[in-house]
Image (spheres, grey):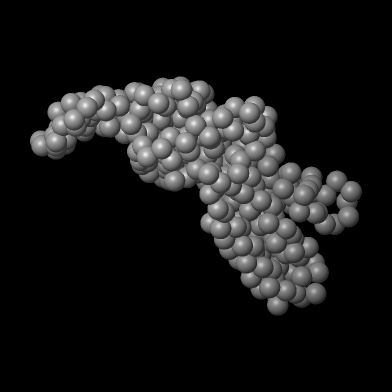
Amino acid sequence: MNPKRSIGMKWMAVSGILSLAITISVANAQTPGGNPAGRGNFGGGRGGPAPALFTALDTNKNGSLTRSEMKSAFDSWFTSWDAAKTGSVSSDQMLVGLTAIFPPPPAPAGGMSGGFNPAGNTTPLTAKQTDIDAMMAALPKNSGAKPLRARKVLVFAHTGPGGFVHSSIPLAAKTVEALGNQGGLWSTTISYDPADITAANLKQYDAIFLDSTTACFLDDADPAVTASRRAAFLDFVRSGKGIAGIHAATDSYHSDCVAASAATAGRSEVSRTRSESVTALAAASMRSVNSSSVSRPSAVASRRRLTVASRSASEARTSMKPAL
């Protein structure tokens, strides 16, 4: 083989590996700079996969990367993954190796917003006073017509297992409460506890407001509890009472989540489809790893297959039907 072509093929393989490393890092949803304070910083600026990738490649820790360091890192990774010394690695070996280099972050603590929480969130969140003040100043001056009888609204702010805990949740809840208080339109109960979704408890409310309730927010490790909550919720709506939602309330029940799996593995269907996407990309990228046996036309085809795999994974996520 032409030496120049061989070098070119090898660097195409390196590019494929690094692209996959970035994909895995994004899939692991790393929070930039260890700052879980808000979604606005998620994956942007100096955060996301870049710091982890740079650290892994900067072997001499001098704060800069050279071509030699990048090549050396790739060679060492490949040698480590090729335990049998066959001169090739499988997609599973590569995925395990890259996951070791870019491990998923630890689960955020309860009450922490701005990130995915494998266990969900039942801890009440607190809005910044400055945000509350700005919201109060922006409320409409006309409170509207007062209802003939007292009304009660339940703001449900629980995040299901694996869901993204939005930093806007507590301010949205306070906004609904403030709107109701203005002119005595309704009284508000704010709950982060899924145990409040029972037929008996819901009888007192006229409407439920879903406050960015991502993932399977009604589900429990006990299938009987899950079925009871779902039935209570649907019966509430079917009875003619009100239901409203904001922002990520629609990011729920993309499929019929398995409660037991979510509780024991700490993963929602969103996390599962993200993992499938990474696996599909890994399988497609593997076709370009053996640079010694790859020709230029096949390398082009590998890049096309990688694009198709990425597109297929994306289409799979958007084609899911609601379960409720």
Compared with 130, 63 (above or below) is below
Q: Is residue 199 left or right of residue 304?
A: left
Quadrant into which the N terminus falls: bottom right
| Residue at 80% in and 54% down | 90
| Residue at 10% in and 36% down | 141
User: Among all residues in the image, which is located at the extreme left?
Assistant: 141
Residue 294 in percent (x, y) is at 76, 70
Residue 63 in percent (x, y) is at 53, 41
Which of the 4 quarters of the picture holds residue 107? Answer: top right
Residue 217 in percent (x, y) is at 51, 34
Q: Observer-nearest residue: 187 or 192? A: 187
Q: Is residue 169 left or right of residue 142?
A: right
| Residue at 34% in and 34% down | 207
Asked if residue 150 shows in the view, the reply is yes
Residue 293 in percent (x, y) is at 81, 69
Asked if residue 209 shows in the view, the reply is no
Which of the 4 quarters of the picture holds residue 135? Answer: top left
| Residue at 34% in and 23% down | 189
Q: Observer-nearest residue: 106 or 289? A: 106
Q: Observer-nearest residue: 312 or 283? A: 312
Q: Is residue 51 left or right of residue 44?
A: right
